Image (cartoon, rainbow, N blue to C red):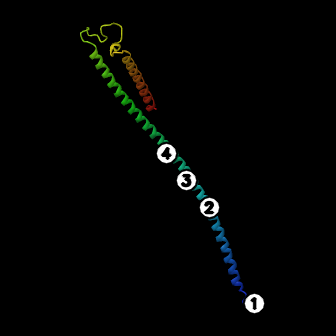
Amino acid sequence: VIEAAKPSAEESSMVRELQGQLEAVKAKLASKDEEFEVQLRTYQQQYEQLKAAFERERAKMESSANARKRERELLTQVEEQRTMYTRKIRDLEAKLKQKVPSSNGGGVGGPHTGGPPFSRMSSGGGDSLSTVGQLRQREAEVARLKAELDRKTSK
């Protein structure tokens, strides 16, 4: 009875053959898994490299945008200061023309000789000189800022 319950030789060889095929398929699957893991790591590295390059480029663009924004702000400041000081110069010239009588021979300096015309502009005298000095300082600062701006924009 035991002999009859045993698989036949043909069935046994078929089972061994199928087990061999199963082992081959398992080995092939393991090698494909390994291959895909390597490929996945390669893609992850490429992604990280691209991400880092993108971040560097974005930072460079932000820096450039900030520099352009600062440049526009400086230009606006220079123009505002230029306008303000041009207006001050016109006002001071108008005050000078009002204070200097035209009957003194046409000279801008007035009847006294050798002194600046601005020394007689106000009752205190020192007030006008300090305003003129401040104006000249501001003009020099504007010129310096323009030169610096030109130097930076030409880079």
First in sequence: mark 4 vs mark 2: 2
Q: Residue at x 40, y 26 (%)?
A: 142
Q: Position of residue 45 (x, y in %)?
A: 58, 53
Where disc 2 sits, the SS reads helix
Is the residue under label 3 in contact with that under label 4 (CB below 8 Å)?
Answer: no
The label shown at residue 35 is 2
Toward which corner of the image does residue 26 lie, by quadrant?
bottom right
**Residue 115 vs residue 81, the one in the foreground:** 115
Is the residue under label 2 in contact with that under label 1 (CB below 8 Å)?
Answer: no
- How would you rate the neighbour count of disc 4 (Cα within 10 Å): few for under 14, some for 14-19, many for 20 or more? few
- How would you rate the neighbour count of disc 3 (Cα within 10 Å): few for under 14, some for 14-19, many for 20 or more? few
78 up-or-down from 45: above or below: above
Where disc 1 sits, the SS reads helix
Residue sitting at the far right? 2
Q: Position of residue 43 (x, y in %)?
A: 57, 56
Toward which corner of the image does residue 145 lie, by quadrant?
top left
Is the residue under label 3 in contact with that under label 2 (CB below 8 Å)?
Answer: no
Alpha carbon separation for disc pair 1 and 2: 47 Å
**Residue indicated by mark 4:** 58
**Residue indicated by mark 1:** 3
Q: In the image, which is nearer the foreground, mark 4 or mark 3? A: 4
Q: In the image, which is nearer the foreground, mark 2 or mark 3? A: 3
First in sequence: mark 4 vs mark 3: 3
Alpha carbon separation for disc pair 4 and 1: 80 Å
**Residue indicated by mark 3:** 47
Q: Residue at x 75, y 90 (%)?
A: 3
**Residue 97 vs residue 26, the one in the foreground:** 97
Alpha carbon separation for disc pair 1 and 3: 64 Å
Alpha carbon separation for disc pair 4 and 3: 16 Å
Where disc 4 sits, the SS reads helix
